[in-house]
Amino acid sequence: MAGYPLVIVSDAIFSPGRCLRELLDGAGMLEYFDHCVFSDEVGRSKPHPAMFEAAARGVRCAVSDLVHIGDRPHNDVRGPHALGARAVLLTVVKDRGAADSGADAVCDDYTKLPGILADLNG
């Protein structure tokens, strides 16, 4: 997304990060990301602070400057919030409790994401 460093922060449940990078590269998508953080490489999974700290280190920013975007309230909202980062809950595919998530914003349509990020960074 123009103007923002993009980091993949993913629990590598079925495939290790090495394989996920190969898949992204083969699809021509890896070049759009500034950094990747995979749970098998960090040794922890979301919502553990190490995942979000690795993301911040990867793009040389403070953890509190992160805006994490994910679809699970426990991992993708409570994890970043515990470190002072902001969180956007995606409900594009499924709403897993947006009303009670405590997310800084909820995104129900990918095309709304740039506007949501602009509002958060006001």
Image (cartoon, rainbow, N blue to C red):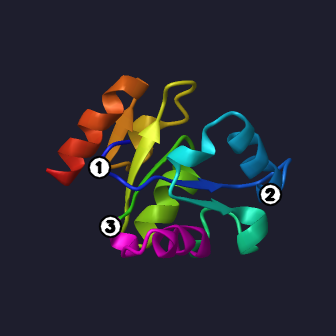
Label 2 element class: helix
The image position of residue 55, as x and y in percent, is 52, 67
Residue underneath mark 2? 18
| In this rendering, position of residue 16 left or right of residue 80 | right
Residue type beneath disc 3: Asp
Looking at the rendering, the stretch of residues picked out in magenta corresponds to 50-65
Residue 16 is tagged as none
The image position of residue 95, as x and y in percent, is 52, 29
| In this rendering, position of residue 9 left or right of residue 116 | right
The image position of residue 78, as x and y in percent, is 49, 59
Residue underneath mark 3? 65
Foreground residue, 68 or 89?
Answer: 68
Tell me the residue at 37%/73% (across/down). 61
Q: Disc 2 and disc 1: Cα gap in Å?
A: 27 Å
Q: Magenta stretch: residue 70 in it?
A: no
The crowd level at tag 3 (other Cα within 10 Å; few <14, some 14-19, many 20+) is: few
Residue type beneath disc 2: Arg
Foreground residue, 11 or 15?
Answer: 15
Quadrant (top left/top right/bottom left/bottom right) for the N terminus = top left
3 vs 2, front mark: 2
Query: Tag 1 or tag 2, which sits nearer the N-term?
Result: 1
Residue underneath mark 1? 3
Q: In which quarter of the image is residue 110?
A: top left
